[in-house]
Image (cartoon, grey):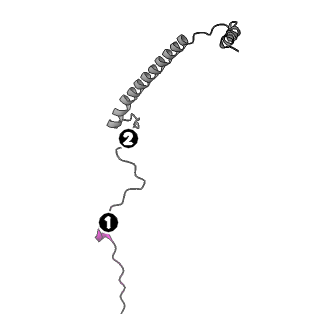
Amino acid sequence: MDASVLQCLMRSSVDDLPPLPDLVPGAIALGIRLRRRSRLLVAANAICAIIIGAVTVPALLTGNTDTPKPASSPSSPPSASPPCPQPRPAAALPAPPCTSTP
């Protein structure tokens, strides 16, 4: 079998098939859309990180956590025990009984 006969047989087998579609323009458009979408997501994430940093860093540095304070804070904490009694003077104490042995 000669090479030219083989080429002729191969051409005749694919002559009935439609031509292949051009995939390049669709692939390029898809690549452009994906690149734009990824750049947009990166920019949005960067903006969110900057906003979160701008809010939290000053709050951490100043110690301001914006927690609600109690409505009324007493001037001194309540005591669980009653106040201590005042000591009595030594003269007011009764004298100890005398125990003498003869």
Give x and y (percent) for residue 75.
34, 44
Asked whether the residues under the numbered discs 2 and 1 touch, taking CB atoms below 8 Å apart as contact, a structural biologist would say no
Where on the picture, by quarter, is residue 68?
top left
Is residue 53 depicted above or below 98 in this figure? above
Mark 2 or mark 1: which comes first in sequence?
2
Where on the picture, by quarter, is residue 87?
bottom left
In the picture of the structure, the residue carrying the numbered disc 1 is: 88
Residue at point 37%, 56% (across, down): 83
Residue 3's tag is: none
Q: Element at badge 2? A: loop
Judge the density around disc 2: few (<14), some (14-19), many (≥20) Cα neighbours within 10 Å: few
Front position in the image: 69 or 34 = 34
Residue 73's tag is: 2
Q: Amino acid at mark 1?
A: Arg
Give x and y (percent) for residue 82.
40, 56
- Determine if the magenta segment contains residue 87: yes
Give the magenta part as a residue range. Answer: 85-102
- Determine if the magenta segment contains residue 47: no
Residue at point 38%, 27% (across, down): 50
Is residue 88 depicted above or below 18 in this figure? below
Where on the picture, by quarter, is residue 4?
top right
Q: Amino acid at mark 2?
A: Ser
Residue at point 36%, 80% (across, down): 97
Q: Element at badge 1? A: loop
Judge the density around disc 1: few (<14), some (14-19), many (≥20) Cα neighbours within 10 Å: few
